């Protein structure tokens, strides 16, 4: 569920949605979600002073709290 949420948000932000790749590494209590986008779309995902990335992390945190798990978003260059 969390992986699909991040993928949906990222695809809405970028110019090349076909190059959005999301992978999830699940642990017992924590999930690490890795987001990869095209190099030219990286700025759109991060946003000015990291505001867009922070907003995505906030939404992810709220969604993961609902399913009683901890989730971390890693944006990979």
Image (cartoon, grey):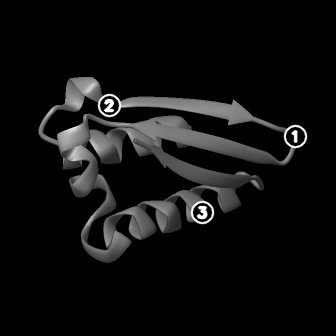
Displayed quadrant of residue 40? top left
For the residues marked 2 and 1, what is the alpha-carbon distance in whole angstroms?
A: 26 Å
Q: Looking at the image, which residue is at 46% across and 35% down?
A: 4
Of badges 2 and 1, the one in the foreground is: 2
Picture mark count: 3
Q: Position of residue 30 (x, y in %)?
A: 77, 48
Q: Which of marks 3 and 2 is nearer the N terminus?
A: 2
Assign a secondary structure to mark 3. helix
Q: Earlier in the sequence, mark 1 or mark 3?
A: 1
The quarter holding residue 63 reads bottom right
Closer to the chain start, of discs 2 and 1, is 2
Task: List the single residue furthest toward the top.
Answer: 18
According to the picture, the residue beneath numbered tag 2 turns out to be 20
Image quadrant occupied by the N terminus: top right
Residue located farthest toward the left when viewing the structure as drawn: 15
Crowd rating for badge 1 (residues with CA inside 10 Å; few <14, some 14–19, many 20+): few
Looking at the figure, which quarter contains the C terminus?
Answer: top left
Q: Is residue 39 above or below residue 43?
A: above
Q: Which residue is drawn at 71% across and 51% down?
A: 67
In this rendering, which labeled residue sits more in front, label 3 or label 2?
A: 2
Q: Distance between the residues labelled 1 and 3?
A: 16 Å
Q: What element carries label 2?
A: loop
Kind of element beneath mark 1: loop
Q: Residue 28 carries which label?
A: 1
Instruction: State if disc 1 and disc 2 touch (CB < 8 Å).
Output: no
x and y percentages locating residue 38 in the rendered image: 25, 34
Query: Closer to the camera, 60 or 36?
Result: 36
- Circle number at residue 61: 3
Q: Distance between the residues labelled 3 and 2?
A: 21 Å
* Place of residue 46 in the rendered image (x, y in percent of width and height, measured from the top left): 33, 60
Q: Do the residues labelled 3 and 2 touch (CB within 8 Å)?
A: no
């Amino acid at each position: 569920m969390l992986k699909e949420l991040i993928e949906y948000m990222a695809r809405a932000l970028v110019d090349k949605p076909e190059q959005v790749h999301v992978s999830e590494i699940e642990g017992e209590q924590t999930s690490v979600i890795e987001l990869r986008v095209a190099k030219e779309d990286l700025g759109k995902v991060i946003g000015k002073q990291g505001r867009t990335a922070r907003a995505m992390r906030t939404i992810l945190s709220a969604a993961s709290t609902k399913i009683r798990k901890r989730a971390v978003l890693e944006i990979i260059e």
